[in-house]
Image (spheres, helix red, strand yellow):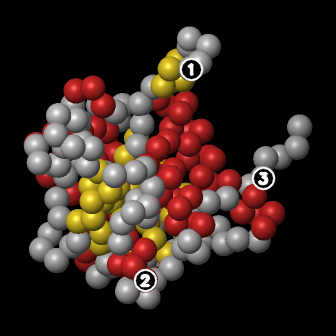
Amino acid sequence: MKTPHTLREVAGLPTDLPRLRDCALVLVDCQNTYRQGLMALEGVEAALAEAAAVLARAREAGSPIFHIQHDSGPGSPYDIRAEIGAISAPVAPADGEPVIIKHLPNSFAGTGLLEHIAATNRKDIVLVGFMTHMCINSTARGAFTLGLQPTVVASATATRPLPTAAGGVVPADVLQAASIAALGDLFARIATDSAALPD
């Protein structure tokens, strides 16, 4: 069996992790949505703690910080007017940190996120948040397509089990590992945890 390799390696794209101070941090959907009820994720509290650790380091480094909040309207688990859709307290925005509302999985679709990042003169972005297989996936791929260089902090993401068309279930840990591996194949550099990001 051949040793696995990534398309990043084949294409000669960078694999070394960028310094956090040179990146913009984007926190995707770090909302109470994922901490309770229908959409609660496996490992969400540990992932949220890791996101908070990245946020604290980014603030200390003076990195630009952008909070993404998904809104699906009243009565949904993503109602930003209700506590269920609020950004979670451990990563609550500080004064001056923009909150960008989105309605689609890709945080760049229909929002001003790209313009905000362009104004920082940065191409490298760090992504944390939820869900790994959905909005982190879509946002990382969107960033790559737009010419940005995303890094995903794996430990600061989480997902949930999914049903299959054949009537089975993909466990959350399997989906998490596959989602991170798929992103790392081409679209993003992967930091295993918050400590792996250089200052």
| Residue placed furthest toward the right | 1
**Can residue 47 be spotted in the picture?**
yes
Q: Which residue is mark 3?
A: 5
Q: In the image, what residue type sits under mark 2?
A: Ala
Left or right: 120, with 175 as reference point:
left
**Can residue 199 be spotted in the picture?**
no
Task: Tell me which residue sits at (44%, 88%) in the image.
Answer: 121
**Quadrant housing residue 25:** bottom left
Residue 164 badge = 1
**Residue 151, percent across and down?**
51, 64
Q: Nearer the N terminus, badge 3 or badge 2?
A: 3
The answer to whether 63 is drawn above or below residue 108 in the figure is below
Q: Which residue is mark 2?
A: 118
Q: Residues within 10 Å of mark 1 (few under 14, many from 20)?
A: few
**Residue 147, percent across and down?**
58, 75
Q: In the image, what residue type sits under mark 1?
A: Thr
Query: In terms of depth relative to the viewer, which is nearer, 114 or 44?
Result: 114
Query: In terms of depth relative to the viewer, which is nearer, 117 or 111?
Result: 111
Left or right: 167, with 107 as reference point:
right
Tell which tag, 3 or 2, sits nearer the viewer.
Answer: 2
